[in-house]
Image (cartoon, helix red, strand yellow):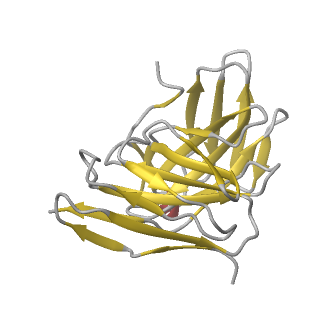
């Protein structure tokens, strides 16, 4: 089945720890995105990548880092510098030249 | 001003009712518009694209008003299963960067 997978589904982290969220897609999409969603709010863009080995900061990139070494994979690291990391993290992808984005099932991160 | 704004609701309607949501956007250069549906604690799922000429898919109709800079979603003959949060998404021309609204919550009651 084609789609986007994210792991883990739930993640608990102690303050001061870095954690990495996985995002993999087998849709052959060029573009990939990371969003954060807080209760009662819309999606806010953290980072996006239009092509392998290239990525750009979104609106709330501080405290996060990404890599795009493979077309299929776009992992997000939440660093200890992120002040309020507890949130629902969503990965999405889209075809280059097309604009509909498709989402993975998300990772719920809780900082203890 | 936010790039994209929606009435958070909730809209509480009986089964069979017709309900409409609007989504306003701030940038007149925006080129692509979409509606997503998001169930509680799930990921958003693409509902439909919004074309300049409008778009209809069964009970759902989406329209674009460029002059007033808003898009709309009309749901006819509401079903219980339509209960969800509806997010609008707007992006800039030639650029795969989206802005999402905060969503409008719909509750369809028996």
- Residue B15, horizontal then vertical, whole percent: 49, 56
Q: B23 or A89, which is in the foreground?
A: A89
Q: B35 or B55, which is in the foreground?
A: B35
Q: Is residue B65 above or below residue A18?
A: above
Corner quadrant of residue B41: bottom left
Corner quadrant of residue B16: bottom right
The image quadrant where one finds the C terminus of chain B is: bottom left
Residue B13 falls left or right of residue B93: left
- Residue B59, horizontal then vertical, whole percent: 69, 53
Residue A15 falls left or right of residue A20: left
- Residue B4, horizontal then vertical, whole percent: 54, 29
Residue at horizontal 40 percent and vertical 37 percent from the top: B8
Residue B38 falls left or right of residue A88: right
Q: Is residue A3 above or below residue A17?
A: below
Q: B14 or A110, which is in the foreground?
A: A110
Q: B80 or A52, which is in the foreground?
A: A52
């Amino acid at each position: 089945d084609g789609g986007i997978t994210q792991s883990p589904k739930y993640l608990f982290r102690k303050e001061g720890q870095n954690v990495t969220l996985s995002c993999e897609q087998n849709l052959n999409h060029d573009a990939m995105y990371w969003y954060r969603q807080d209760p009662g709010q819309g999606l806010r863009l953290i980072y996006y990548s239009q092509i392998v080995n290239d990525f750009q900061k979104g609106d709330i990139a501080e405290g996060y880092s990404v890599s795009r070494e493979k077309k299929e994979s776009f992992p997000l690291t939440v660093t200890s510098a992120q002040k309020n990391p507890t949130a629902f993290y969503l990965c999405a992808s889209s075809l280059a030249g097309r604009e509909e984005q498709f989402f993975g099932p998300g990772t719920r991160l809780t900082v203890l | 001003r936010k790039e994209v704004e929606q009435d958070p609701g909730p809209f509480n309607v009986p089964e069979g009712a017709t309900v409409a949501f609007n989504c306003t956007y701030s940038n007149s250069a925006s080129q692509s518009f979409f509606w997503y549906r998001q169930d509680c604690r799930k990921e958003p799922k693409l509902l439909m694209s919004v074309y300049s000429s409008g778009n209809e898919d069964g009970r759902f109709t989406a329209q674009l008003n460029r002059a007033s800079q808003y898009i709309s979603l009309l749901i006819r003959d509401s079903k219980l299963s339509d209960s969800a949060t509806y997010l609008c998404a707007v992006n800039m021309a030639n650029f795969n960067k989206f802005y999402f609204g905060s969503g409008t919550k719909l509750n369809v009651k028996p």
